[in-house]
Structure formats: C-alpha cells, structure tokens
Image: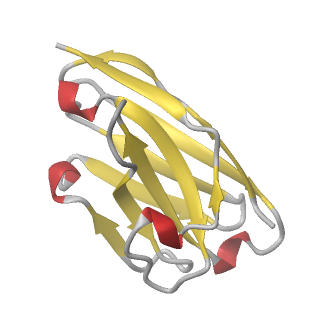
Amino acid sequence: QVQLVESGGGLVQTGGSLRLSCAASGRTFSSYTMGWFRQAPGKERDVVAQISWKGDRTYYADSVKGRFTISRDNAKNTVDLQMNSLKPEDTAAYYCGASSYFAPTSARAYEYWGQGTQVTVSS
C-alpha cells in the first residue's frame, strides 16, 4: 500500500517555473515506477513523465521534453517534477502515481494516486 500527497502547484505566468513534489508513505516506495500525469477539464489523464524505481530510466511526453525534469529520492520517499518554461497549455491538475509495472504505458497501469495539485499558467 502506498499513499501519495502532491504539493507545489499554483499560478504562474508564461515562461515561469514550478516544482511539484510528491511525498509517499510505505516501505516499498523504492520498488515502484513513479509517474506524473496531468488532466485538464473534460480530457483524459495523460502521462507527463515517468521514472524507474532506481531512477536510471525516465520517460517524457513530447510536449514537455526539454522543459520538465522528473527525479526521485528513495531515501526520502519523494518524487519531484521541475517544470520550466511553462506554457498556458500546461494548465491542468497534476497527479502523482505509483505503478508496480516495470514499464507502464498508461494511467491504467498505475495502482496508486495522489489527490492532485492544480497548475495554472497565465498568458
């Protein structure tokens, strides 16, 4: 069982930066692939970035490559998402997820979710 709590969302202007953090409880955090997803109103929850349990493999959606960076600290049970050069189209609720799959390919492969944190980018 893993419980996830996100923080760090807010309102930022175009071109600004935000850092999201996800704190996990549970002794097996280091065995999960972790991901950040986002969901805009009326749209599906889409992957933004994923990181393997060791932190040696990452995946980014094309729309955020070069702007976002995912990282994890297994000693602190945290996974962060550094978001730079933010655009209005990045506006969404951002969710942290945990998956026991080696290489999850969609939100359906994630068993645990946080409550979400809102990111709003003004133009």
Q: Quadrant of the N terminus?
A: bottom right
Residue 85 location (% of width, % of height): 20, 33
Residue 72 location (% of width, % of height): 54, 62
Q: Nearer the viewer, residue 57 or 99?
A: 99
| Left or right, residue 84 beside residue 112 | left
Write the residue at 19% across / 56% down: 65
Q: Nearer the viewer, residue 21 or 93?
A: 93
Write the residue at 31% across / 28% down: 91
| Left or right, residue 86 beside residue 44 | left
Q: How many marks?
A: 0
Q: Quadrant of residue 90?
A: top left
Residue 117 location (% of width, % of height): 53, 32
Please say if 62 is above or below 17.
Answer: below
Residue 62 location (% of width, % of height): 16, 58
Q: Quadrant of residue 32?
A: bottom right
Q: Quadrant of the C terminus?
A: top left
Please say if 41 is above or below 68.
Answer: above
Q: Is residue 87 visible?
A: no
Write the residue at 56% across / 37% down: 116
Write the residue at 55% across / 67% down: 110
User: Colour scheme used in the picture?
Assistant: secondary structure
